[in-house]
Amino acid sequence: MAQPTENIFGTVFNIFCLIFEILLIVVKFLVAVSQAIYETFTAEERSVEGDIVLITGAGHGIGKELALQYSALGATIVCWDINEQLNLDTVNLIKSKGKKAFGYTVDVTNREKVLETGAKVLREVGDVTILLNNAGVMPQHEFLKHTENEIRKIFEINVLAHFWMFQAFLPKMIENNKGHIVGLSSMAGLMGLRNLVPYCGSKYAVRGIQEALSEELRASSNGNSKIKFTTVFPYMVDTGLCKTVKIRFDNFMKLVNVSEAAAAIISAQRKGLEEITIPRYLFHVMRVGRLFPNVSMKVVKDFMEAFVESDQ
Ligand SMILES: NC(=O)c1ccc[n+]([C@@H]2O[C@H](COP(=O)([O-])OP(=O)(O)OC[C@H]3O[C@@H](n4cnc5c(N)ncnc54)[C@H](O)[C@@H]3O)[C@@H](O)[C@H]2O)c1
C-alpha cells in the first residue's frame, strides 16, 4: 500500500512537471510567433521552374492569368476548364510563347471525370506539384431568390470540387511528400455579405477545408509533411465575376486588377504563406476588426459601402 508521504512527493513532482511543460510551451509559442513574423517579412519566393502546376478554371479571369504568369516563370501548366474553347485559348497562348501547357476539358463537379482525367494527367504530364483550386461561380441576389439548383451548383463547384481534386492528386503528393495546394476563397469567406449568402457559405467552407486538411496531414506525419497550403481571400477582382458592384470610395476600394491578383497569389504560394488577402492590408483590417464587437464593425461596413448588388 502506498505511503501518504510518497503520494505527496508524487503530486509535487507532477505539479513541477506540469509547470515545466507550461513554461516550455510559452517559450515554443514565443519562438513560433517570432519565426512567423520574421518569415512574413523575409520569406523568399522559391523557384517554380520545373513544377507542374494544375489550375482549374484556367480559361478565364484569375485562372487564366495564373496560367500565363506561372508559365512565364518556367512551370509546366495543366489547364482545366469546363469551357473547351476558352481553355484551349489559354493553352495556345502559353504555347505561342514557347512554354509548356496541356489542356483538359473537365467539369470539376463531375467526380468520376475528375478522377479519370487526374489519372490521365499523372500519366501524360507527370506528378502535379502545385494545385490551384480556382474554378468558381458567384450568383448574386437575395437568398430567397436563389433557386435550389443555383445553391447546389455553387456548393458543387466552389466546395465539393475541391474534395474531388484532392482525391485525384493528394495521394501522389503524400507519396512524394511534396506539393502545394492553393484554394481560392474570397473576402466573402471572411465576412458575410448581402446578396451572396450561398456564395459566402461556400467560401467560408474553402477556408475550413484547407485548414483542416493541412492540420490532418501535419498530425498524420508527426509534423513532417512537406505539403503546403495557401488559402487566398481576394477582394473584388476585375474579371467580370462581380456583375453589379457598389463601392462608395472607389479610388480607395477599387476593384483589384486581375494580373495583380494573380501575381499576389503566385508570390504567396512561392513564399509558402498560409493565408493572404488581396490586397494584403485587408488581412490586418480583418484581424484587428475581430477584436471589436460585431456591431462596431457593422458601423464601419455601412460607412465603407462596398458590396455587390443583386443582378436581378
Ligand atoms: N473575381 C472576383 O472578384 C473574385 C473575388 C474573390 C474570389 N474569387 C474567386 O476566384 C476564383 C476565380 O474567379 P474569376 O473571377 O477568375 O472567375 P471567372 O468567372 O472569370 O472564371 C472562372 C472560370 O472557371 C470555369 N468554371 C466554372 N465552372 C466550372 C466547372 N464546373 N468546371 C471547370 N471549370 C469551371 C469557367 O469556365 C471560367 O473559365 C473563383 O473561385 C472566385 O470565387 C473571385
Image: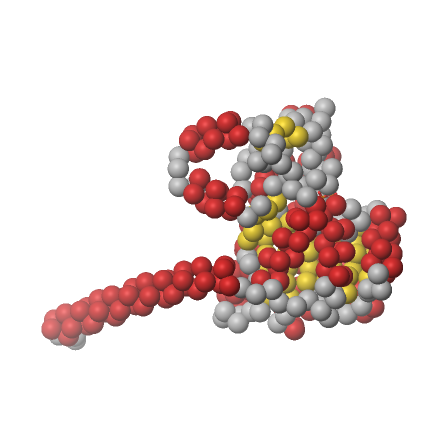
Q: Quadrant of residue 152?
A: top right
Is 127 placed left or right of 92 in the picture? left
Reply above or below: 99 against 287: below
Instruction: Name the image quarter holding the C terminus.
Output: top right
Looking at the image, what colour scheme do you see? secondary structure
Which one is in front, 108 or 284?
Answer: 284
Q: Quadrant of residue 146?
A: top right
Residue lying farthest to the front in this orientation: 251
Residue in the picture at 11% in, 73% down: 5
Instruction: Name the image quarter holding the N terminus.
Output: bottom left
Residue in the picture at 41% in, 60% down: 33
Is residue 2 visible from the viewing direction of this image?
yes
Is 256 placed left or right of 21 in the picture? right
Quadrant of picture, ligand 1: top right
Residue lying farthest to the left in this orientation: 5
Which one is in front, 73 or 64?
Answer: 73
Q: Position of residue 141 (x, y in %)?
A: 67, 28
Is residue 206 visible from the viewing direction of this image?
no
Q: Position of residue 32 (x, y in %)?
A: 41, 63
Reply above or below: 191 against 53: above
